[in-house]
Image (tube, rainbow, N blue to C red):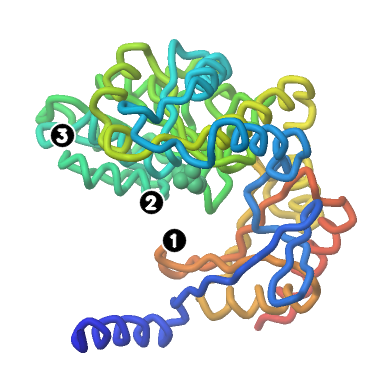
């Protein structure tokens, strides 16, 4: 198809011209925070494996054992024959961790949000989404057919204004936000959002992909706000829990509804038993040593102190450089010094806010954190 390849070629050329083309780069992970790319070993500050549990011998062994005992894949949708008993064990554990009645596991975090949101809201409804919420929240919102209203990032006053303007015309309302913002590392004011939701009869969904395992003793960002009511607590198994898969924790009624209606559960193959076993092993390790959950944020704070940046609230610290070109150049200079810090560019972040997104993990040495901070300080000195 000549027109097809011409189309793809033109798209790629346009992205190249704006420094916005992305390329895959095969990467092997070694012990600790070391990764290997193009035969070079680098200390990675771009992994979301905050507790390094994907590499933990007990987590690996749990995954291997489950794969050997039960097979490499789930073989069908959970509603057919893909609902391995490990999945309900995991759901009970997640519900307990989050303090909800029940939980539902999905094939990934992306599949969780794109399944949950359209199950709960539709064309007569409205969904309010934080401007910097993760792409899969936006995808779920668009799939739902509800009216999608963007509110200014972490700005409850803006949300309140929009609720007053838009809520009454809709049947149901959902407010969706990241708990910890994936590219900025800041935390949503879940207590204030929860109060607004209560006052305006809206349902609060918080995506805790970057909070579970690393905030509030591992319980996640929601637990930082004991008075917040968060009926829809979504998250992923793929970051601090070192495995793969997503979940939603909520009331029994909501979970029962998802299990019969969420299209990404009904029409997608179940999570492999090995992923569930690995997540369970990770949750065991966290329960046995809750102090480990504090290490990634402590590393991030060491970094922000060294650079005199605002104190890190999570393991994620952005260093905003503006243009995609600047971000790519900074990343390349750090790579030459042995650090992998991937440049994050639009459309993952808003235009003009390309950045280094630095993710700290328990595997980082304090010395390496300080060396990275100093390398970044000298980058900025060198930038006009
Ligand atoms: C990574 C991420 C997801 C997607 O989770 P996966 O399990 O990787 O699909 C969802 N939301 C946020 C905020 C994320 O950072």
Q: Residue at horizontal 41%, vertical 35%?
A: 270
Instruction: First in sequence, mark 2 or 3: give its number.
Output: 3
Residue 211 quadrant: top right
From the viewer's perspective, is 355 left or right of 138?
right
CA distance separating discs 2 and 1 = 8 Å
Establish whether ligand 1 lies closer than 8 Å to the Cβ of label 2. yes
Establish whether ligand 1 lies closer than 8 Å to the Cβ of label 1. no
Q: Identify the element where label 3 is drawn.
A: loop
Picture coordinates of residue 9, whole percent (x, y): 32, 86
- Residue at numbered disc 2: 135
Picture coordinates of residue 338, whole percent (x, y): 79, 71
CA distance separating discs 1 and 3 = 26 Å
Circles 2 and 1, Cβ within 8 Å, touching? The answer is yes
Q: Between residue 90 and residue 301, name the one nearer to us.
A: 90
- Badge 2 local density, few (<14 within 10 Å), some, or many (20+)? some
- Residue at numbered disc 1: 348
Q: Residue at horizontal 35%, vertical 19%?
A: 255
Q: Residue at horizontal 40%, vertical 23%?
A: 194
Q: Which mark is residue 140?
A: none
Q: Identify the element where label 2 is drawn.
A: helix
Q: Where is 348 relative to 63, above or below?
A: below
Q: Which mark is residue 122?
A: 3
Residue 343 quadrant: bottom right
- Badge 3 local density, few (<14 within 10 Å), some, or many (20+)? many
From the viewer's perspective, is 288 left or right of 93?
right
Q: Identify the element where label 1 is drawn.
A: loop
Q: Where is 70 relative to 137, above or below?
A: above
Q: Between residue 50 and residue 9, name the one nearer to us.
A: 9
| Image quadrant in which the C terminus is located | bottom right
CA distance separating discs 2 and 3 = 19 Å
Picture coordinates of residue 267, whole percent (x, y): 27, 38
């Amino acid at each position: 198809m000549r027109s097809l390849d011409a189309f793809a070629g033109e798209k790629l050329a346009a992205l190249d011209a704006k420094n916005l083309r992305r390329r895959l780069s095969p990467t092997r992970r070694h012990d600790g925070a070391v990764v290997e790319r193009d035969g070079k070993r680098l200390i990675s500050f771009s992994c979301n494996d905050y507790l390094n549990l994907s590499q933990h011998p007990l987590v690996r062994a749990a995954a291997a054992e489950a794969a050997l005992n039960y097979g490499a894949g789930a073989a069908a949708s959970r509603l057919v024959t893909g609902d391995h008993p490990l999945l309900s064990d995991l759901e009970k554990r997640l519900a307990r961790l989050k303090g909800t009645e029940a939980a539902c596991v999905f094939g990934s975090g992306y599949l969780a949000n794109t399944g949950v949101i359209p199950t709960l809201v539709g064309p007569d409804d409205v969904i309010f989404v934080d401007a910097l919420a993760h792409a899969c929240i936006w995808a779920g919102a668009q799939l739902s057919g509800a009216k999608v209203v963007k509110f200014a990032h972490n700005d409850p006053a803006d949300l309140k204004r929009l609720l007053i303007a838009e809520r009454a015309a809709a049947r149901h309302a959902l407010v969706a936000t990241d708990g910890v913002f994936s590219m900025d590392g800041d935390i949503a004011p879940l207590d204030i959002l929860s109060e607004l939701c209560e006052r305006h009869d809206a349902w609060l969904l918080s995506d805790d992909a970057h909070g579970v395992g690393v905030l509030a003793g591992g319980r996640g960002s929601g637990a930082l706000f004991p008075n917040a009511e968060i009926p829809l607590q979504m998250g992923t198994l793929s970051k601090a829990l070192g495995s793969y898969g997503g979940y939603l924790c909520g009331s029994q009624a909501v979970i029962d509804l998802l299990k019969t209606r969420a299209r990404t559960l009904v029409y997608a193959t179940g999570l492999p038993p090995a992923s569930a076993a690995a997540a369970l092993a990770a949750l065991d390790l966290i329960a046995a040593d809750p102090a480990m959950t504090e290490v990634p944020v402590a590393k991030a704070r060491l970094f922000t102190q060294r650079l005199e940046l605002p104190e890190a609230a999570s393991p994620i610290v952005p260093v905003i450089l503006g243009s995609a070109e600047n971000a790519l150049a900074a990343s390349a200079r750090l790579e030459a010094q042995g650090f992998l810090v991937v440049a994050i560019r639009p459309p993952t972040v808003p235009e003009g806010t390309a950045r280094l997104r630095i993710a700290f993990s328990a595997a980082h040495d304090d010395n390496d954190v300080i060396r990275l901070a100093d390398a970044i300080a000298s980058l900025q000195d060198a930038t006009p």
